[in-house]
């Protein structure tokens, strides 16, 4: 008899370590600008110390408040994977806590992204293991299923595919398709160089602000 709603799929990553490393220090805001500000999360926040996350997505679709398939995902994940959990966004029962995050860290998993609550937040907030979540709840999870692993999921409105690059900081999270990663990285590097130059001009007092009045003249506000 088929178990509807259960699926465990294997995905082979295509993003190289060299490509992944290019996103290690990029600001999410700058990546977002290059991606035309149409992607990414708003309401999922970092719980851990440091606030950054980077890795390849291993996706999980789970019922709200149930983490059976998240446990299986930990066992399947390769070092450097980010386990991305679509738990429906509901904020009742926590999906992970200290024990699961400790086990994932031991396996060198890069972190969790949870569209739902987590618990043991005080402990997690003092550690460097990356955890992004929608909220916090003391209520523990169930382990009944169903659930699916390595399928397209949605977290806070952002579609994530297995193998996507997941990058996050205090401003939010982005999912980057492997086929677009190199081109995006090249453009972000140029944006960050331009920002560095602008900050240097501000520090030196040489920043050109004539564009503000020019924009207002173009709108007919100034003559």
Image (cartoon, grey):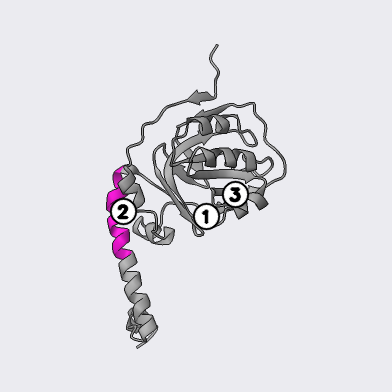
For marks 1 and 2 on the same chain, the one whose residue lies earlier in the sequence: 1
Nearer to us in this view, 164 or 25? 25
The residue labelled by disc 3 is 134
The residue labelled by disc 1 is 42
**Camera sees residue 188:** yes
- Residue 198 appears at what percent x and percent y? 34, 76
**Numbered label attached to residue 17:** none
Q: Secondary structure at mark 2?
A: helix
Disc 1 + disc 2, Cβ < 8 Å: no
Identify the residue at horizontal 59%, vertical 41% (top origin): 102
- Residue 120 appears at what percent x and percent y? 67, 46
Identify the residue at horizontal 38%, vertical 81% (top origin): 202
Residue 220 occupies quadrant: bottom left
- Check if residue 47 falls in the magenta segment: no
| Residue 135, placed above or below residue 34 | above
Q: Nearer the viewer, mark 1 or mark 2?
A: 2
Query: Bounds of the magenta span?
Result: 179-191
Identify the residue at horizontal 58%, vertical 26% (top origin): 146
For marks 1 and 3 on the same chain, the one whose residue lies earlier in the sequence: 1
Q: Quadrant of the N terminus?
A: top right
- Check if residue 183 falls in the magenta segment: yes
Most extreme residue toward the bottom is 223
110 vs 92, left or right, is left
């Amino acid at each position: 008899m088929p178990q509807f709603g259960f699926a465990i799929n294997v995905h082979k990553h295509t993003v190289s370590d060299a490509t992944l490393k290019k996103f290690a220090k990029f600001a999410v805001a700058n990546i977002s600008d290059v991606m035309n500000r149409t992607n990414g999360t708003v309401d999922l926040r970092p719980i851990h110390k440091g606030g950054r996350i980077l890795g390849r997505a291993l996706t999980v679709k789970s019922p709200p408040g149930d983490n059976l398939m998240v446990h299986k995902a930990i066992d399947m994940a390769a070092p450097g994977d980010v386990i991305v959990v679509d738990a429906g966004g509901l904020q009742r029962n926590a999906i992970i806590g200290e024990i699961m995050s400790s086990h994932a860290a031991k396996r060198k998993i890069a972190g969790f992204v949870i569209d739902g609550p987590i618990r043991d937040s005080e402990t997690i907030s003092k550690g460097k293991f990356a955890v992004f979540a929608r909220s916090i709840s003391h209520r523990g999870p169930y382990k009944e299923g169903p659930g699916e692993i390595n399928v397209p999921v949605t977290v806070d409105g952002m579609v994530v595919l297995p193998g996507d690059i997941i990058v996050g900081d205090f401003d939010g999270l982005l999912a980057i398709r492997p086929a677009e990663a190199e081109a995006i990285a090249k453009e972000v590097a140029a944006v960050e160089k331009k920002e560095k130059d602008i900050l240097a001009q501000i520090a030196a007092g040489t920043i050109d602000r004539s564009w503000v009045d020019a924009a207002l003249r173009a709108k007919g506000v100034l003559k």
